[in-house]
Image (cartoon, grey):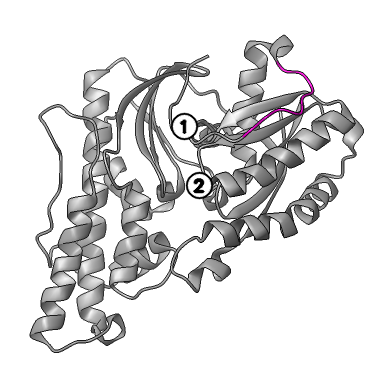
Amino acid sequence: MKILSIETSCDETSVAIVENGHKVLANVIASQIDLHAKTGGVVPEVAAREHVLKIIPVLDECLAVAGLGWNKIDALAITKGPGLVSSLIIGTETANVISYVKNIPMIPVQHIVGHIYSNWLEIEDKIKFPVIILTVSGGHNELVLMRDHHKFEILGETRDDAAGEAFDKVARILGLGYPGGPVISKAAVNGDNKAFDLPRSYLEKDSLDFSFSGLKTAVLNEAKTYAKNHSVFSEAELPDEFKNNLAASFQEAVVKVLADKLIQAYEKYPEVKELHLSGGVSANTRLREVIESKLPKNVKFRHPKSLILCTDNAAMIAAAAYYLYKLSPKKFKPCTNITPSTSFEIESQ
């Protein structure tokens, strides 16, 4: 079964074609990073306008890369949310028109569920349930217990700032650029992760929720204190050694909490066969290293096969759609009424 999927939840315009939920035939992404780097973050109106310009060229390129015509596409998948509503509208309206004109079934997919299914792409073996997934991106953090396809139980989630958002804000504080994840990681390589004693919020005993707002504030206070004591008037004047050390200390505080919470979740559910990492922050090599260092020997650890599958992409939406379709094929029909959703709730089927 070949599914063509569209993902426009934020600032990437992506169209993919995936066969049987795991084989990626094409996964085309038009990134807006250079555009939003000018403002240090995503401006919704600007992102939406870029989606309008890019959606049709990306769609055409995807079909060309896969070497397929519309007659070979069995179903459509679309990200319904959460995300920037103005961006989601471009994708959903495009999908609505295609579904109607081509008479192809439409499968709406929740964005976070898409990230969860990124670990099903390009693998040869079979994933064994139950699985615990740590999915970490710019707008969300969740710990999810997955007992079967599209059977989810939320174990923990972010109470304030998600880890990816904290990376972006700290990068801005230190004048390192955008997006925050890659630039913080690059700076951290040359820094001392024990240079600053930054807070690590574990919340209440046994809590699997996350909170990074206090950590972000602590970084800001360290930067302000240094600036005041050394008569520094802008981020550009902060010395590289200071920025590298603070970036490394910040990164270590984030990845330690994320890894500890994942292992803590496993200890509550020792019947779990695999631990998964997904979302944009899953590209962080230090996070992978820390998780692997804590990993029980009898548990398999997975993260997306390539960095392109960590960030927002349409292939993960197609993978999630395939397993959703297999649960109830008659449920999905050609339609023109899919509208964006801002809900972060992950629903089991």
Q: Tell me the quarter of the image containing the N terminus.
A: top right
In the rendered image, which residue does mark 1 sit on? 343
Determine which of the numbered discs, if any, sits on residue 237 in the image: none
Q: Few, some or many C-alpha atoms within 10 Å of disc 2 (few <14, some 14-19, many ≥20)?
A: many
- Residue at the image position 60 percent from the left and 54 percent from the top: 12
Pinpoint residue 180: horizontal percent, then vertical percent: 39, 63
How many residues crowd mark 1 within 10 Å: few (<14), some (14–19), many (20+)? few
Which type of secondary structure does the marked residue at label 1 adopt? loop
- Indicate the quadrant where residue 316 lies: top right
- Residue at 22% x, 58% y is 216
Q: In front here: 189 or 115? A: 115
Residue type indicated by callout 1: Ser
Secondary structure, magenta segment, majority class = loop
Highlighted magenta segment, given as a residue range: 332-339
Amino acid type at circle 2 is Cys
Mark with earlier residue (2, 1): 2
Number of numbered discs on residues: 2
In the image, residue 288 above or below residue 241: above
Q: Secondary structure at mark 2?
A: loop
- Percent x, y of residue 126: 54, 23
Say whether residue 244 is left or right of residue 19.
Answer: left
Q: Is residue 72 left or right of residue 116?
A: right
Quarter holding residue 72: top right
C-alpha separation, residue under disc 2 versus residue under disc 1? 21 Å
Q: Nearer the viewer, residue 62 or 66?
A: 62
Disc 2 designates what residue? 310
Residue 100 lies in magenta, yes or no?
A: no
Query: From the viewer's perspective, is residue 33 above or below residue 118?
Result: below
| Residue at point 51%, 43% (across, down) | 83
